[in-house]
Image (cartoon, rainbow, N blue to C red):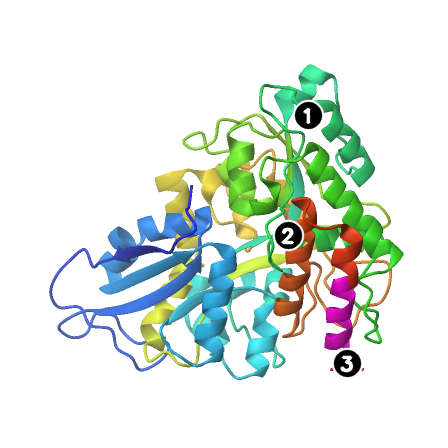
Amino acid sequence: MRTRRMIHVAVTAAAAGSLLVACSGAGGSANSGGGSESINVLMVGNPQMEDIAKLTKNTFTKDTGIKVNFTILPENELRDKVTQDVATQAGQYDVATIGAYEVPIWEKNGWLHELSSYADEDASFDKADLLKPMVTSLSGSDGKLYALPFYGESSMLMYNKDVMEAKGITVPERPTWQQIADIAAKVDGAEPGMRGICLRGLAGWGELGASLTTVVNTFGGTWFTKDWKAQVNTPEFKKATNFYVDLVREHGEAGAAQAGFTECLNAMSQKKVAMWYDATSAAGSLEDPSSSKIAGHVGYAYAPTVETKSSGWLWSWAWALPKTTKKADAASKFMLWASSKEYEKLVGEELGWSRVPAGKRASTYELPEYQKAAASFGDITLKSIEQADPANPGVQPRPTVGVQYVAIPEFQDLGTKVTQEISAAIAGKTSVDKALEDGQKLAEDVAKNYQ
C-alpha cells in the first residue's frame, strides 16, 4: 500500500519524434509540429489514480505525444498541496484532482478554467451521459462545469459475507447504526486478529471528518444551523461523536487514530476487519482478486441511518484546470480522455471491469461487462449517489450545501482541527467532551464571518 511520502510517477512518451501539441484552446491538434509537450498532474493516491498512472504512457501519450508527469499524494497531503498551489497561483500543476467542496469556492475566486466548452466541443466525450449529481456538484455559479469527474461515489457498508454466515448474522440492506454496532460486537474476533469494523480515525476534514459528519447528520446533528449558530457541542453532535469513538475504540481496527481510507481498504481486503463503512468506490478494489483476499465474498448495504432515510455522502474526485496553467489545450485533452467512456473501457479490458472508475456516467451501468463485475455493488452505488441530498442531508435546514462538509472556505481548517481532537479521543489522549468544547469555540469564530 501507499506510504506517507510523496510518490512521483513520470509517464514518458512512448514514441519519439514529431508530435507537438497546439496550445490554441479547445480542439487544438496534438499532432502538428516536431517535438512533444508535457503536463504536470497532481492527484490523490487512491487505486483509481494509480491505475491511470500505469495506463497513460502506452495509450494517451502514445496517441497524442503528450507526456504526463504524475505526482500522487495521500489525501491529506494532496489537499494541502493543491490548495497551496492553486490559491497562491504558483502554477506548478496543469491538472489537479479536487472535489465538490472546492469547485464552487474556487470558481468564485476565479482560480479555475471552465470546462464545459472543452466537453461540448468533444462529441465523443458525451457530456449528457454524466450523472446529474456529479454535474451539479462540479458546476459553478454560471452553470458551467469547472471540473470533470474521474469517478463519483457515495458511502456504504461493506462486510465479510463468510464471517456473517458463520455467525448466523443477516446484515440488513438498510441498517441502522445501532444494528451495525451490535453486529460489530458479535463478529469482533471472529477470526484470529480480526476486528469488528473499520472506521476512519485519521484526522482531516476529508478523512475522519467525512465519515463522522454523515453519522452526525443522521443522529440529528449539524455543524451549523441555517442562521450560522455553531452546533459542535450540542447533545446531538456529542451523541453521534461518542457513538463513533466508542464503536471504533471497542471494536475497530488496530491503530484506528492513524487509519484513513487507504488503511481501512487494506484492512478489509486482507480480512483484518469484518465490516467497513466508507466510500462506494472502494468496492472495485475489494472485488479485485489480484489485490484482495476477500474478492467475491463481500456483502454491501446502504449507509447506516438513525433519524434520516439515507445518510450516504456525495463526492467526486475530479480533474480541474487551474487558471495558472500555460498548457490548457494539452491538459484538457488529458482530462477529457481520463473521464471518457474510452478510458473506462480501457480499464475494464486491461485491469478488470470491477476497477472501472465508475459513479459518473449512466452508460457505465448499462455495460454488460461492468454489470457482471459489479453485480454485488453497482446498484447500491448508483442508488446511493442518486439518493444523496447535499441540500438537505440532515433533520434541519443547513446554511450551505454539502453532506460530509460545510461549503465554506474556513471548513477545511475547521474540520481538520476538530477532527484532530476527535482523533486524539480515539487514541485515548483526550475526551470527546473536551474535543467538542474546543471545537465549538473554533466553530463560533467561523460563524461570526457569516452572521
Q: Work out whether 3 lies above or below 275.
A: below
Q: Rounded to the nearest whole Å, what is the CA distance between mark 2 and mark 1?
A: 22 Å
Q: Do the residues labelled 2 and 1 touch (CB within 8 Å)?
A: no
Q: Work out whether 17 lies above or below 59.
A: below
- Label annotation for residue 349: none
The residue depicted at 64 percent of the width and 57 percent of the height is: 420
| Type of amino acid at the residue the image marks with label 2 | Leu
Near mark 3 (Cα within 10 A), the count class, few <14, some 14-19 or many ≥20, is few
- Label annotation for residue 448: 3
Q: In which quarter of the image is residue 181?
A: top right
Taking the image as drawn, is residue 323 in sight?
yes
Q: Which callout, 2 or 3, points at the residue further toward the start of the chain?
A: 2
Mark 1 element type: loop
The residue depicted at 72 percent of the width and 75 percent of the height is: 446
- On the image, numbered disc 2 is attached to which residue? 208
| Type of amino acid at the residue the image marks with label 1 | Asp
- On the image, numbered disc 1 is attached to which residue? 188
Q: In which quarter of the image is the N terminus?
A: top left
Mark 3 element type: loop
Of residues 355 and 322, which is closer to you in this image? 322
Q: Which callout, 2 or 1, points at the residue further toward the start of the chain?
A: 1
Q: In which quarter of the image is residue 290?
A: top left
Task: State whether the magenta stretch is mostly helix, strand or loop.
Answer: helix
Of residues 384 and 446, which is closer to you in this image? 446
Query: Does the magenta portion include 429?
Result: no
Q: In which quarter of the image is residue 30?
A: bottom left
What segment carries the magenta color? 438-448
Where is residue 370 drawn, in percent x and y? 50, 40
Where is residue 102 drawn, in percent x and y? 57, 70
Taking the image as drawn, is residue 391 in sight?
no
